[in-house]
Amino acid sequence: MDMENRDTKQKHYAKVYRADRWAARFITAGGYGIIASIIAIMLFLVYQSLPLGKNASLGDVLSFKVNSPENQTFLTGVDPYQEIFYTLDPKGKLSYFNLDKNDINSQYQLPLSGEEKLLTAQKGNLLSPVFAVGTDSGRIITAEISMKPEWSDAGRTIVPSFEVIEEWQFTPENDSIENHIETIAFVQNEDISRFWAWLDHVGGLHLRILDGEYDDEYLHDLSEYFTDTNITALTISHNGESLVAATRDGDLYWFALDDFEDITLKDKWRASNRPISAIAYLLGDQAIVVGGADGSVETWFPVRTEANWMKFQRIHTFEPHAASIKLITMSSRNRNFLTADDKGNVKLHYSTSGATEFNFQPTDYPISTITFSPKSDAIVAVDAQKNFSLFPLDDPHPETTTRGLFGKVWYEGYQEPEFVWQSTGGSDEFEPKLSLIPLIFGTLKGTLYAMLFSIPIAILAAIYVSQFSPTWLARMVKPTVEIMAALPSVVIGFLAGLYFSPLFEDYLTGFLITPILLLVFFFLAVLAWRSVPEHIRAKTNPGQELLMILPLAIISIYASLQLGPLVESWFFGGNMQQWIFSNLGVTYETRNSLVVGFALGFAVIPIIFTMTEDALTNVPDSLSSASLALGASRWQTVRKVILPAASGGIFAATMLGLGRAVGETMIVLMATGNTPILDLNPFNGFRAMSACIAVEIPEAPVGGSLYRVLFMTALLLFLFTFVLNTLSSIIGERLRKKYARF
Amino acid sequence: MMNYQEEVDMVSQTDKQEQTHLDDVLAKERIVIETDDLDFYYNPEVKALKNINIRIPDKKVTAFIGPSGCGKSTLLRCFNRMNDLIPGAYLEGKVMIEDADIYSEKIRLEELRKRVGMVFQKSNPFPMSIWENVAFGPRVNGIQGKSDLDEIVEFALKQGDLWREVKDRLDSSALDLSGGQQQRLCIARTLANKPEIILMDEPASALDPISTGKIEETINELKKDYTIVIVTHNMQQAARISDYTAFMMLGEMVEMDTTKRIFTNPSVQMTEDYITGRFG
């Protein structure tokens, strides 16, 4: 061999090795890349849903002494940008301060006369600060605070202003007695109707209503409802429909304010054996917070009784205070509320979950007034020594506790704790219900009906095609099934939802008796076939059975659909839907679980069929030959040798189909009503996790609780399919090791 | 390359007169399998067996030898109708077992295959326990009682000369046995059906010499009770274990005679050429 030749040969081998190395690197990189991207997806889902579990926390406090001659403060508040805050002192002086410099921005004076002093004050609207004060000379002054941002070239400035809306003198019937306003509750609702309720100097309860639409004024004395003048606290719902008064005996009185002329006592009951010291309506006007003189904190809301009338019930008991509850303040954003006791201790609670999120002591002195910032991103408080403090509040997802997501929760307006998914409502006051249980249930329900339909058909078809059918038939069936798999699921969902489900409803009884009639016809056909003489039977070739069975199947389906109305009138009173409703207690929905079962099954069948067929075909012929040579029939061979040997593959196929059904989105989205109910009945729908994500993610504000809960749903779905696929691999491998060593 | 086709055709025209020796010998035997002008087609274009007339005597070992593709396995598989599994294949002529045409419509295939057992070239135990492997045949043929099956399994394993080696681990997987043991298990599995005839398709071709020796011993034992037809590539094996040998070539039966005569004094030149290794 000459040198040149050797050189070219070596060059050639070097080239081959280089190509091999690069191919190996490329493939390895690809493999690791896939694993890395799957891990990255999972980590991203975890990262997005992790904040749900974060506890509420307070940031660094901003605190200073307010420059005011009076020690007591009635009201405080801050603008949405946290640039200025205000305080109202007993002399009726409203002062705006700049938060950054602690200097007075501007000051206004309530029109008080001489020595007149404020005794009580109450904010009357969650969004715009309208407030009412009561004085020691029996006057009620209503005024409005405004802190509007204005934009100029220099940037944003908050411009405070103040306006007195109304002054009103309370004149009792017996005006010889000097009177004053002790405790006031005030609300201005969306119709600009105003409601003032107050206690006079002897503890009598009065109510004044100003109809915003007609400008009519109503005055009621509600003292007659009380045997004893021992009212301690008042609250009016923000919609102005209810007034609740609490007493020293622990009683609650519930007045309906719907009819301005005729105020009625709707209910009264004993809530506690100890005095009630504070009450407040929460956002949503359903639940009230009841604070006791013993420091107890409870929420109550009306629940429909069996007699179909509303009665308040104790829903949650929160972590108690060590001292009497003095103040209750609710957030205008969610079901959060603050309770402050006489010693200055403050707790943050969340009413839906019944959880007390944290406990803190803003200052060393008792709290005069405490409130949330407009965006509920800070708590501001002023103590009895004029110390103002602002605590940034970080509590983005109070509603998503583990119990809230996976446990039963007693939502407002419900008769008992339940699993409910209802993420959004008509108004901002809506209580989000984010239980994942109905979604998980929905996914499992859809999967169950799909698998009930698809597993038998797919596996039996695979057995037939791989073991019994003639080659020409198998050659036709396999590509057809692959086309079935290639059909976009949106098309299946669309057809199922818009075409098949109404058809199914029209021929409901027919469709329901089809499987029965099919079995009966097949059974009869087999019996008939057996009585055919042996020599004729022996002449049929494989594949010809299809020519006999196919017309039979068509005839039995046709017969079922024709017989449907007859069966319906014989057994089901002529109307299947009505019969289902009255006998099973379920409203028949057009897009129900059976329709989804068919449609989803249609999508799953190709997967299970193809993989099962492969598994069965891969069982070596030597095994079936051995079985047949031992005198086993074809069916015995399939049942005793081929099926066990292919069991690993069949199991893996089923699991993969299951994974597909769990993750399938468009079909369950389009072919169900997407109702998140917990009911296994096949005649109503469900909402699957995947469909829920698809439906709700466009509406979910980025970073909000719903957004993150949907990410968590995605994570659950991911884990679900991950576990299913892993299980299918592990168990499939075990079965293969046991039965498929050939 | 010689053109064998002409020679084969010539032989088959003359063998009728020449095989007087075989006729004499077989006259003393009971004939179990007999074919009558058997032609076999894989499809209408491929004729694998041509005009086969063979008689196989009872309780003797008959070996089929011949080069690859000569049709010896195909002929063997005609006797238990395993060829039925090949799509498109068909046969003409007759195959008689105990004077009954096994291709007639009255024959139940399962019954036939129970009577005519088969051992394959590559051992093919089921992925089950040893016990289940042996009990498979009796079970599919309707025997259910555990004690009955135990008895059959023991009998079959003893006859298959495997009992001593596996009696303590009947429940362990058959796939854990060695290759030779697996093949003897397949023989025992066939014996469990209590067949009359055992067809063996190169049963030792995939085994080492020691395992082959064991299989041959087993076959020697079995011929007391069973009619054995064996296909083999190994001339020495045929010489060692068979009583009769049939030499096949290009789908035709060139010559059949007692083994002794085939290996010492064949009547056809081509047989001698093959046996002495001039082609193959």
Image (tube, rainbow, N blue to C red):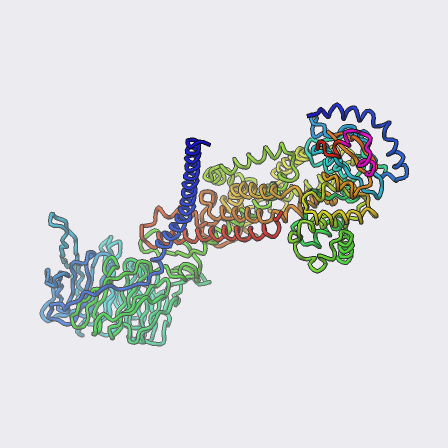
Left or right placement of residue A475 versus residue A181 in this view: right
> Which one is nearer the viewer's eye here, A25 or B234?
B234
Is B266 one of the magenta-colored residues? yes
Can residue A511 be seen by looking at this rendering? no
Count of numbered circles on the image: 0
- Kindly report the secondary structure that dominates the magenta region of the rendered protein: helix
Residue at coordinates 74% horizontally, 56% vertically from top-left? Answer: B163
Q: Residue at x 44, y 34 (%)?
A: A6
**Is residue A80 among what the camera can see?**
yes
Position in image of residue B209 (x %, y %): 70, 47
Residue B279, by quadrant, is: top right
Looking at the image, residue A447 lies above or below residue A464: below
Instruction: Judge from the rendering whether residue A211 lies leftward or rightward of residue A464; answer left or right.
Output: left
Q: Where is residue A647 in the image (x, y as percent from the top left)?
A: 60, 49
Foreground residue among A196 and A476: A476
Residue A325's x, y, as percent?
Answer: 28, 72
Q: Which residue is drawn at 76% across and 24% down?
A: B7
Q: Residue at x 15, y 61 (%)?
A: A99
Relative to residue A310, is residue A126 drawn left or right? Answer: left
Q: Quick one: which residue is furthest to the left in this view?
A: A114
| Left or right side of A361 for A273 | right
Q: Who is closer to the viewer here, A237 or B253?
A: B253
Toward the viewer: A72 or B250? B250
Q: Using the rendered view, name the quadrant where residue A314 is placed.
A: bottom left
Stretch in magenta: B259-272
Residue A446 in the image: state x and y as whole percent: 50, 48
As for residue B25 lying within the magenta part, the answer is no
Residue placed furthest toward the front? A2
